[in-house]
Amino acid sequence: MPFAGCDGFVVRIFPGDNVQGSVGMGFVVGDQQVVTCAHVVNTALGRDQYAQDQPGPEALLKIGFPLLGDDAGDTTRDCRVERWLPPHSPGTAGGDVAGLVIVNGGLPDGAGLARLILADRVSGAEVGVFGYSSQGRTMQSMQGAWVTLRLRGAVGHGDLQLDTETESAFKALPGYSGSPVVAHNQDGDAVAGMLSAAYRADAPGDLRDAYAVPAARIAAAWPDVLGDLLAPPAPSGVASAGIAGQPLASAPSAPPLPSPRAAVADPGVQHLAQQPTEPQPGLPQPGLPQVIAGNWTIDVQSPQGGSFKMMLALMIPPSGQPQFEGTFLGTPTPMEVRGYWLVMGSQIRLTGVQTVAGVIPMQYPYDVMVTFASWSYTQLVGVSSNGERVVWQRQG
């Protein structure tokens, strides 16, 4: 399925069966799949906004495609919840991602996939969100409106900060949750994140900013559907789009990745991430599963500027279940880590626990996805679902 422009992937979430109202937004990620915020789903179903349990298969949501126009006919569809990362309380880390599957047919004519892009490629750029205000009967609440924001980068918990442009006629208000954060360039529209929090219209000027879940974390939340929609970071030597406030369209960018379906239809299409950075003489170009097992030193750089190193050994024991164990280095107390890993296309998922050396209790359960932009037998470069840059270097 080809990537679509924002008119084709923006989705409206209705309150119950009321197709005149709106509780939030979402966007298309598959031929029957849509992503939105978990708290939007709760609101649509009349549940407490912070309800943690996943709605059952009998709970259906009604969605629409507000930007397709009258020529598209009836664009309403019913969906059930298939993927669920429950909402979190304000100011705390959490998931707040829901994956929906259309149950009464496919997408309407004109709808299509959103292309995801890593937020650091559009840091400083103007982005847009579309939604319906939940505050009062205004044109913004009845017809919807685009709001222009500036993507400032990652803040606490890895969320993206979005500043309201002073000349913008509209603000991102409650009711915009779940809206894709859309960046525009010569490759078309791309989604850098999903709006998850917006403030009241009457809030003081310094509280009118919004926050979004980054695309990397959305992809990690539903990897079997979204993993291959995430474009890798710009190659070495290519300037990041939007740095120093330059519009995204003025900066060069890597070509978009094909969708998983396009890759199946055209065997000659290959993801950028599937091309090793340092091919070894006399050896075939490796796939990620061929190079991943072994001992690695991993450098991790957080969006806030901190960094740490980790020694990690990945292995496939006789049981056939890939496992890893290692140690975080350079931390006040060395942390042992152990768990399981799984390769999915251009990604590796690490699921395990951290324990203080010599202590048994599972102190810090974690689940992280690393999306690799390039790799060879000796080095892997990518970004984690927490927005961290990672460089893996093979030892020995």
Image (cartoon, grey):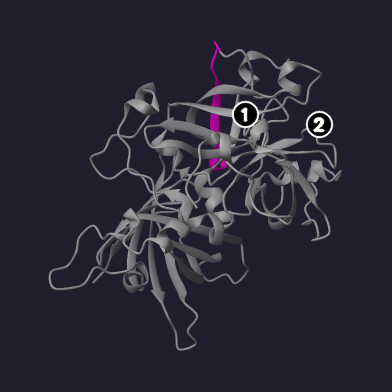
Q: Vertical placement of 166 versus 352: above or below?
A: above
Dot 2: element:
loop
Q: Is residue 231 magenta?
A: no
Whether residues under marks 2 and 1 lie with C-beta atoms below 8 angstroms apart, the answer is: no
In the image as oriented, which residue stretches furthest toward the left? Answer: 281
Question: Residue 311, percent across and down?
Answer: 37, 64
Answer left or right for 154 relative to 234: right
Residue range (magenta):
156-167
Instruction: State the CA–CA distance, disc 2 to disc 1.
Output: 16 Å
Q: Which residue is mark 1?
A: 130
Q: Is residue 341 above or below residue 144?
A: below
Residue matched to label 2 = 20
Q: Residue type at mark 1? A: Phe
Residue located at (39% from left, 22% from top): 245
Does the magenta portion include 162? yes
| Residue 94 visible, this orientation | no
Q: Is residue 333 left or right of residue 292?
A: right
